[in-house]
Amino acid sequence: MIHHFSTWNLSLSLEFWASSLSLAEQSLIHHFSTWNLSYVHMVVGTLRHSIPKSVVYCQVREAKRNLLDRFFTELGAKEGRQLGKLLDEDPVITQRRQNIGKRLELYRAAQSEIDMVF
């Protein structure tokens, strides 16, 4: 795994080239390797903390979708009276909504007849 690497291991692998480099170049390479290794450790730590959260998020999203599907299926199977009881709507408002729905159907039928003529 990546987190087993250390700057010492990286320095050992660079010893082959170290003989042809000056002390300043060796120091610069060591400095860069330390920075890169720190970055790798940061990325590994971030992934270690974020991947479990992502998995849980996906599980919750799927459970939410399943619950909503079941809810809408059960809700769609209910009759108008049962839905009215669930809404606990005022009977006057219910009657008004139904009348407006009927008028809307008449307007749509009239619109389709007008469209057929033109």
Image (cartoon, rainbow, N blue to C red):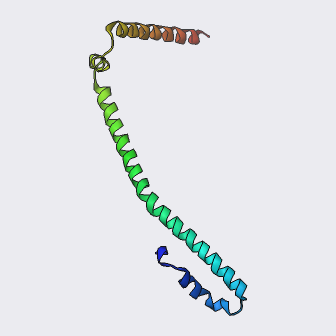
Q: Residue at x 50, y 8 (%)?
A: 107
Q: Give the residue displayed 41% in from the left and 49% down from the top.
A: 57
- Quadrant where the C terminus sits is top right
Q: Is residue 95 above or below residue 87?
A: above
| Residue visible at 48% across and 74% down in the picture | 3
- Work out whether residue 101 or residue 87 is closer to the camera in this orientation and state it: 87
Relative horizontal placement of residue 113, taking residue 75 as reference (left or right)? right
x and y, in percent, of residue 82 in the image: 26, 19
Outermost bottom residue = 19
Hey, which quadrant is residue 98 in on the image? Answer: top left
Q: Position of residue 28 (x, y in %)?
A: 68, 80
Q: Position of residue 75 (x, y in %)?
A: 31, 27
Name which quarter of the figure residue 80 lies in.
top left
Q: Nearer the viewer, residue 118 or 41?
A: 41
Q: Is residue 82 left or right of residue 65?
A: left
Report the residue at 66% width, 80% height from top. 29
Q: Is residue 88 above or below residue 38?
A: above
- Horizontal side of 61 relative to 18 (left or right) equals left
Q: How many marks?
A: 0
Q: Is residue 68 above or below residue 86?
A: below
Task: Say whether residue 98 is left or right of residue 9.
Answer: left
